[in-house]
Amino acid sequence: MTQVTGLRVAITGGAQGIGRALGQALTASGARVALGDIQDAAVMQTATDLGAVGRHLDVTDPESFESFLDEAATELGGLDALINNAGIMPIGPLLAESPDVIRRAVEVNLLGMITGTRLAGRRFADRGRGHVLNIASVMGAISSPNAATYCATKSAVIGFSAALRQEWRTSGVVISAICPGFVRTELIAGMTPPRLLERFMVVDPDDVARAAITELRRGSSRTVFVPRPVGWIARGTGVLPTALVDGVFRLAGGEKVTAGIDHTQRAAYRARIEGRDE
């Protein structure tokens, strides 16, 4: 088991939501943390609140990512782990989705994660140890209508992490994929899950943070779901007939989560990810 106290951890998307919860839980556990985010003022404030390092980071720009890791390592005295948390969640019918938003989701959720994993992984491989944690989603394993692009990016995160689990098996570098259910952050603004799904699939950012700390302590490459029963469901659906899986999904009200959106509640988040709030 790895001790979290003293670990030096960089977190992307660290200004708010899951990123802030990760930073808070890790600093409370004795880790030293660097938070990166494209929202400069917000990440600096969060870093001040948590006693962490805050830096500008655009995960879609490899030079920005390299600079962030360099600065994190300098400020923290080295780097032991990277948590690729930055992500956006466009919701709506694919045929109505802007090509710019589709491209942005792929660049942030997938290419940004690959860039960070490659850059941090190279550093970790050179010294024979390190841990990359990729925040995926249950929607990468259990797909939902009106979220095709998001589901595609998160499914890719899971597959990418699983491939590196094999590739890095003897390198000393560990890779984890954490797949939360619907997390109570601005990403699910305007969504109202049915009571059954609310009970079993909706979690708080602190739940994700606790899972990340468990993975850092465990120090082994694997894919985990938060909460754990969601993983049983996700893996179980893989062996069932498609028509049965889709029927049960609809019966449980799954499609209502991303179809019955309150667009007024989601307007501010949508404007931000589309770049209309600047």
Image (cartoon, helix red, strand yellow):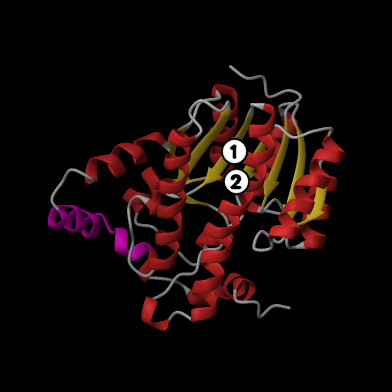
The kind of residue on which mark 1 rests is: Val
Q: Provide the residue designation for mark 2.
A: 117
Where the C terminus falls, by quadrant?
bottom right
Residue farthest along the top direction in this orientation:
1
Residue 66 as seen in the image, left or right of residue 119: right
Across and down, in percent, residue 163 comes to 43, 41
Where the N terminus falls, by quadrant?
top right
Q: Residue 38 carries which label?
A: none
Query: In the figure, 30 relative to 184: above or below?
Result: above
- Is label 1 in a helix, a strand or a loop? strand
The stretch of residues the image draws in magenta is: 242-257
Residue at the (40%, 49%) spot, across then down = 138
Q: Residue 132 carries which label?
A: 1
Q: Are marks 1 and 2 in contact (CB under 8 Å)?
A: yes
Residues 147 and 72: in front is: 72
The kind of residue on which mark 2 rests is: Thr
- Is label 2 in a helix, a strand or a loop? helix
Q: Earlier in the sequence, mark 1 or mark 2?
A: 2
Query: In the figure, 2 relative to 144: above or below?
Result: above
Across and down, in percent, residue 46 comes to 78, 50
Residue at the (66%, 42%) spot, across then down = 120
Residue 141 as seen in the image, left or right of residue 98: left
Residue 268 highlighted magenta (yes or no) = no
Residue farthest along the front direction in this orientation:
126
Residues 198 and 248: in front is: 248
Across and down, in percent, residue 100 comes to 54, 79
Q: How crowded is mark 2: few (under 14 residues within 10 Å), some or many (20 or more)?
A: many
Residues 131 and 137: in front is: 131
Query: In the figure, 204 relative to 223: above or below?
Result: below
Q: Is residue 164 visible?
A: yes
Look at the magenta stretch and give its main secondary structure. Answer: helix
